[in-house]
Amino acid sequence: EAQVTQNPRYLITVTGKKLTVTCSQNMNHEYMSWYRQDPGLGLRQIYYSMNVEVTDKGDVPEGYKVSRKEKRNFPLILESPSPNQTSLYFCASSLYGSGTEAFFGQGTRLTVV
Amino acid sequence: EDQVTQSPEALRLQEGESSSLNCSYTVSGLRGLFWYRQDPGKGPEFLFTLYSAGEEKEKERLKATLTKKESFLHITAPKPEDSATYLCAVCGNNAGNMLTFGGGTRLMVKP
């Protein structure tokens, strides 16, 4: 089954404790991206990657890191999480760039206390 | 900078009552306009891609249309299972490979 898998689905952590949210796709897509979704602000793009070893900032990259060492994986790293990073996070992939249909993961609800 | 505004924010319909959702956009060279459906607690699910003004696409009770400034998602004779948040997004030529989403329209269809 074609899918984008995120882990964990739910995470509660404390301020400053480094964490990683994993994302994996099984469709051999070139493009992967991370979004956060907040009430009243909608979906905002954090980072995206056109291919292995190629990453670019989205609208709200501050406080986040990403890496793309393999085509299928695109982890999101929060080196020192803060409460304003409490949000619902989605990973997505598409075949060629953002101009093609995106497949989204089920989301990761992160709470930073 | 690409911008997307969706209206209304929320819409309540009776089952069978047709209506339209609006997505207004400003973009420097449209590469694609997308409609997604999002159910509570789930990731957005792709519905349509529109590339040029005048284009229309249909799927079951949904029909998406596109002009140079806006897109409409028409819902004909909706059913309760059509209740969801509908998201519009654009990708423009000057945005690199970024996708800009609107705030969404929360649709509630009552039996």
Image (spheres, grey):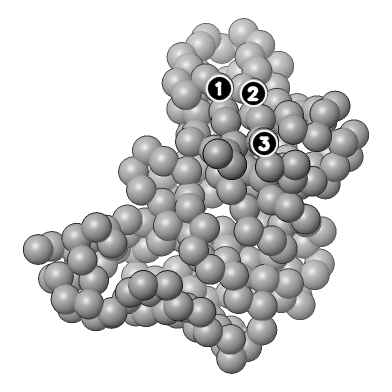
Badge 1 element: strand
Q: Is residue A76 visible?
A: no
- Side (left or right) of B48 relative to A25: left
The amino acid beneath tag 3 is Asn
Residues at discs 1 and 2 both on one chain: yes
Question: Distance from label 3 to label 1 (Cα)?
Answer: 15 Å
Is A32 in front, or is A58? Answer: A32
Horizontally, is A79 left or right of A91 in the view? Answer: right
Image x and y of residue A67, in percent: 80, 28
Label 1 or label 2, whichever comes before in sequence order: 1
Label 3 resides on the chain identified as: A
Q: Earlier in the sequence, mark 3 or mark 1?
A: 1
Label 2 secondary element: strand
| Amino acid type of the residue that numbered disc 2 sits on in the rendered structure | Thr
The label nearer to you, 3 versus 1, is 3
Amino acid type of the residue tagged 1 in the rendering: Asn
Q: Position of residue B53 (x, y in %)?
A: 62, 88
Q: Chain of mark 2?
A: A
- The residue at 66%/30% (across/down) is A24
Q: Residue at image x 52%, y 9%? A: A14
Q: CA distance from mark 3 to mark 2?
A: 14 Å
Spatial separation of the CA atoms under disc 1 and disc 2:
5 Å
Q: Which residue is mark 3?
A: A26
The percent position of residue B26, horizontal first and vertical second, equals: 64, 75
- Give residue A22's mark: 2
Q: Position of residue B17 (x, y in %)?
A: 18, 78
Q: Is residue A21 above or below residue A103?
A: above
